[in-house]
Amino acid sequence: MKRLVAILLGLTMILGLFALSTGGAEQEVKKLKLASHNSEVEGNPYRVRYELDIQEAAKAALEKGFDISYASFVSNWDPATETQQLQNSINEGYDIILVNPVASTGLDPIIEKAQEEGITYINCDVEYLSEDVNILNICTDQYYLGYKTASYAGEILGKGAKVVLISAIAGNSANDFRDEGFLKASEEAGLEIVGRYNHNWSNTESQQIMTEIINSGMEFDGVLVSQCADAALAAYDTTGAKLPKFFGFGDTGEYMQRVLKINEAETVMPYIVVSNPPGVGASALNFGINQIMGKELKDDVYESGNEKYHSIYLPSKIWFTDQNQDEYKEMAEAMAPGDTITYWLTIDEVAEQYFK
């Protein structure tokens, strides 16, 4: 009897908590099918975390009454594969499609088809640059990442210093906006860019390019690199070359752990960490959920100058340098080497900041 009473009391408490969480009434659960489309995942720390964050956000949506099933599709940088996978997701009746695309254009017919079918289609991370479709772009402010890095390099190195710039994929909007930031800040600081390269967001290529630069005998003071910084820095281990006077940016556990070790006793190589949060995909999902809930975006939420693309830029919130690294040491050392700094906006945060 005591055991029965205890069970009944437990059930009463659970039901009471459930009633509180749902305003005293039973919450209706709506099932949604989510398709995440990515150009690359395996071997890319950013994209791995991007997918994991989307899965976490999908689970959290249950608290708001949405039971979301998740599926991931990877095109491996093939536009034709991406188009076919997107068409399949439309045919299979997915409710939400999140796309981190291969390219910044070329998907207008697919987007229009998805919208005709009533699918919530949101572009994430890489800005989709077409004025002919009414698509929502949820992106990190990529210009800021390049500008912040080169600005700090200028503070450290001074006017007239020489730097090499290792970018990602030419023609990719995220990369191109970063490059604009790198170039603008370099110009303002009086930095001379003596070499420009592309690692294509490949750690293998990043280390190879940095190795080739070192072995070429080129004279330079600092390295501006568009992520994959841990791999570029590893080239100094394999070549035994003297470290440069500046390095940045990266945001992986391995990169942070490397630069912390280098500067453990004193500042040996100034650097910068700037977060490019892969949680942008999870934030995008929560924009979609707010839309499905029938909410409307506030006026003037689009990025100034890119209103025609319906682009919302989420700010990078975490950055640090050799000067304040102790504040972030615990975070950095707790991360797996292949993981990357991440965070995202919850459903309620998105609603408060961006919806009426």
Image (cartoon, rainbow, N blue to C red):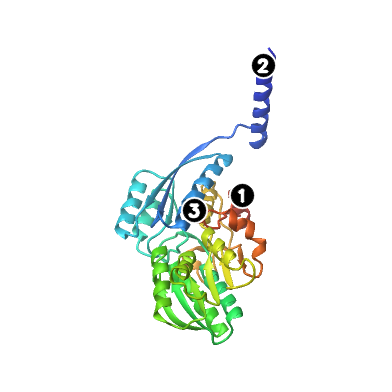
Q: Position of residue 194 (x, y in %)?
A: 45, 83
Where is residue 117? Give x, y as percent.
39, 48
Of badges 3 and 1, the one in the foreground is: 3
* Mark 2 residue crowding within 10 angstroms, few (<14) / some (14–19) / many (20+): few
| Type of amino acid under label 2 | Arg
Q: CA distance from mark 1 to mark 2?
A: 40 Å
Residue 78 marker? none
Which of the 4 image quadrants contains residue 17? top right
Residue type at numbered disc 3:
Arg
Task: Kindly identify which numbered label has been placed on residue 3.
Answer: 2
Q: Which residue is mark 1?
A: 348
Q: Position of residue 121 (x, y in %)?
A: 44, 53
SS at mark 1? helix
Residue ID for mark 3: 49
Q: Are marks 3 and 1 in contact (CB under 8 Å)?
A: no
Q: Residues within 10 Å of mark 1 (few under 14, many from 20)?
A: some
